[in-house]
Amino acid sequence: MIGPVEEAPGGGREATGGPEGAAPWRRLSPRMLLIHPVQEVVRMAPALLGLLIAGSSSGNPGMVWSLCGVAAVVLYGVLRWFTTTYRLTPEHVRLRKGVVLRKVLTVPRDRIRTVDITSPPLHRMLGLARVEIGTGRSGISAGLTLDSLSAEEAARLRVELLHRRGTAGGETRPAAGAAPTVATGPAAESGQTVATAPAPQTGPPAGEAASSPGPGETLLAELRPGWVRFAPFTMSGLVAIGVFATFVWRLFSEWGVDVRRVGPVREGWHWFSGLGLTSQLVIGVPAFVVIVAIASTFGYLFAFWRFRLTRHDGTLHVTRGLLTNRATTIEERRLRGVRISEFLTLRAVGGATLTAVTTGLNQGSQRSGALLPPAPRAEAERVAVLVIDGKAQAASRSGPPGPAAAGPSPVTAPLVRHGRAACRRRFTRAFGAHGLALAGLAVLWHTEVLPLWPLIAGVALLPVTALLAVDRYRSLGHTLVRGYLVTRSGSIRRQRVVLECDGIIGWTIRRSLFQRRVGLCTLTATTAAGDQSYAVPDVELGEALRLIGEASPGLLDPFLRYGTAVPGPRNGAAPQRPADGTGGEAGTAAPGNATAGPGDGRGAGDGPP
């Protein structure tokens, strides 16, 4: 039961009921009484519209039913504020909510990985911010959301939640509890690294960009007006146009309106369909490209306006957004690498994007770990070097410098090219797919389903297929530098991934029938960060074993049999053969698919271990 309510810091209110000495239950900002009803009305708009239509069609005054529905929804939104409270203890963050169905969400503080702050337009008008507390997991254990607190309270809460030092000696508390649960939940995964966030600092409210770095902050990158020229080449407007068109189509369908019978649409389509094929292509293609470019530019501005990347006391802070401000914190101790992505059209104009490969972020969205918006490739490489080197410098301050402290940067280091067999596979796969497409078009033309021109166009595109195969082969490459695995692949979307070897938790070697015939395999590094797996495609088997041996010394021992020598670990130590004499670093892997991971003495292969 919630006891008497008192004012809480930041504009919220506290419920002081409960046992003596317990942390008080706090309420959200009272200004949410103006937002919750609006949110509920917008969420229930389709149902309210259906209520209006149903009431009118039955002969009853539909407006009256709609007004009653709106009043009920507004009342529900008001009750949301009265029934939502949260509490911070030294061990947990708890959220109680629900008007009809009561829920208690619990997040152990030592499981908190991210505290993101979002300020939609209506929240910004009232000086509020939404706090999203994440654990790096998905589903009901993903975390909880406080919607909403004052901007100042949200900024203070982020620092407080990420500041997880113990009370004695600065030691971090041991893991004590499960992942976030609803009421009661299972034990959470263990073994997660606990990081420390900076002490409270002064600065602008959460979600607001600052004109200059705050105390102790280092500015790594910020949006420049010239970068907007890369927006049309991201082709992100295709998604926006598709979503908008689907929404409009479904809206008209709900209203029972046939879009094709609307006057301007009907007349425009009648005029366009009356043109010849050449005229349709000459008019339609440029118009479509212009629309996509405009949509991509607006999307770029909405997502990355006032973008800033700063470093402060072992954390990276990303702020961005035009209408909705977003602030994301990435702990460098959880950073496992970076990824430079170049979409084909973006690469043609010298642009690239930079994304963090890290644990604790929602990787379902490409922008969740964005360290740089579409920008010049040289700028992406510069920021990537700063991020990687900054992490290495922080590690060297906390301990003796290791092998990762010397050598060229893994971001710009030259890559090992793949052999001729990989090149032949690029051409075989490209022309094989093209040939199947041509065969299908020929059958459709022969059966008079399609005219002849699609088949002629397909034959004319053969040189484009050859260029695509060449580009895919030239994109292949890998290396090991300063304790990082670097792999690059792709043509339509070329990606260079720089992955820390210490963050690799397992390896997978896959060999298809065609790969085995030419001595190639696909080596996949498994990690808990980012996409959770990164591949080195079409690499020679011996080279794949060398990469595993250098990146994870001793990991291959249970999977090798004595035979041809494989280079040992990167520290130059002599390879050790197991006492049972079954194999060691000097060995060769059995052919077929195999998976290896730390602490796993089992493997799969076509031959004996």
Image (spheres, rainbow, N blue to C red):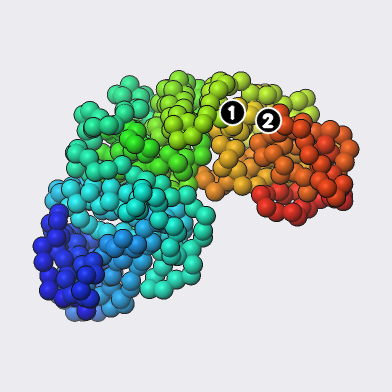
Image point (27%, 51%), residue name:
160
Foreground residue among 117 and 263: 117
Residue most toward the front? 169
Picture coordinates of residue 422, whole percent (x, y): 74, 30
Q: Residue at x 15, y 49 (%)?
A: 127
SS state under label 2: loop
Residue 289: percent from the left, percent from the top?
42, 31
Q: In the drawing, does residue 92 fall left or right of residue 468?
A: left
| Residue 511 in sight in this render | yes
Please, what is the three-letter code of the amino acid marked with disc 2? Arg
Locate residue 178 relative to residue 266 in the image: left or right: right
Q: Considering the image in quadrants, where does the N terminus appear?
A: bottom left
The reply to whether discs 2 and 1 touch (Cβ–Cβ < 8 Å) is yes
Packing grade of label 2 (10 A; few <14, some 14-19, many >=20) is some
Would you identify the image quadrant in which residue 370 lies?
top left
Pick the residue in front: 568 or 65. Answer: 568
Is 516 placed above or below 75 here? above
Kind of residue indicated by mark 1: Pro
Q: Relative to the observer, which residue lies in front, 120 or 573?
A: 573
Horizontal side of residue 578 vs 203, given as left or right: right
Does residue 540 appear anywhere in the picture? no
**Residue 468: which quarter of the image?**
top right
Q: Which mark is residue 315?
A: none
Q: Which residue is mark 1?
A: 403
Residue 570's disc is 2
* Disc 1 element: helix
Asked which quadrant contains residue 89, the reply is bottom left
The percent coordinates of residue 20 (x first, y second) are 20, 74
Tell whether 252 sits left or right of 356: left
Instruction: Report how far apart the C-alphas of labels 2 and 1 lie in the structure.
Output: 9 Å
